[in-house]
Image (cartoon, rainbow, N blue to C red):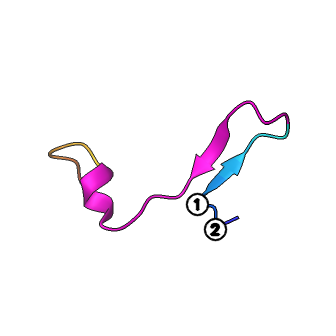
Amino acid sequence: VLQNKNIRAADGSGFLLRKVENPVTRHLPANSHRI
C-alpha cells in the first residue's frame, strides 16, 4: 500500500487515500496552524 503511495477504491474508480510526501507544509494552505 505505502509503496504505491495511494489506496484505490474496491471498484477501482478512484483513490481513497493518497500519501503526502515531505515536507507536509508544502501541501497545507497558507497561514494554517500545525498541531
- In the image, residue 14 lies in the stretch drawn in magenta: yes
The magenta segment: 11-27
Q: Which mark is residue 2?
A: 2
Instruction: Determine the residue positioned at 66% across, 42% down.
Output: 16
* Mark 2: few/some/many CA within 10 Å (<14, 14-19, 20+): few
Q: Which residue is mark 1?
A: 5
Q: Dots 1 and 2: beta carbons under 8 Å?
A: yes
Instruction: List x then y, in percent, for residue 7.
Output: 69, 51
Looking at the image, residue 25 sits to the left or right of residue 14; the answer is left
Residue name at image x 61 percent, y 48 percent = 17
Quadrant of the image occupied by residue 34:
bottom left
Which image quarter holds the N terminus?
A: bottom right
Mark 2: amino acid: Leu
Where is residue 3 shown, x and y percent of the image? 63, 69
Residue 4 position within the rendered picture, expressed as x and y whole percent measured from the top left: 63, 61
Q: Is residue 24 above or below residue 27?
A: below
The correct choice, above or below, for 15 with respect to 18 in the image is above
- Is residue 25 shown in magenta? yes
Residue 34 visible from this viewpoint: no
Question: Which is nearer the eye, 3 or 28?
Answer: 3
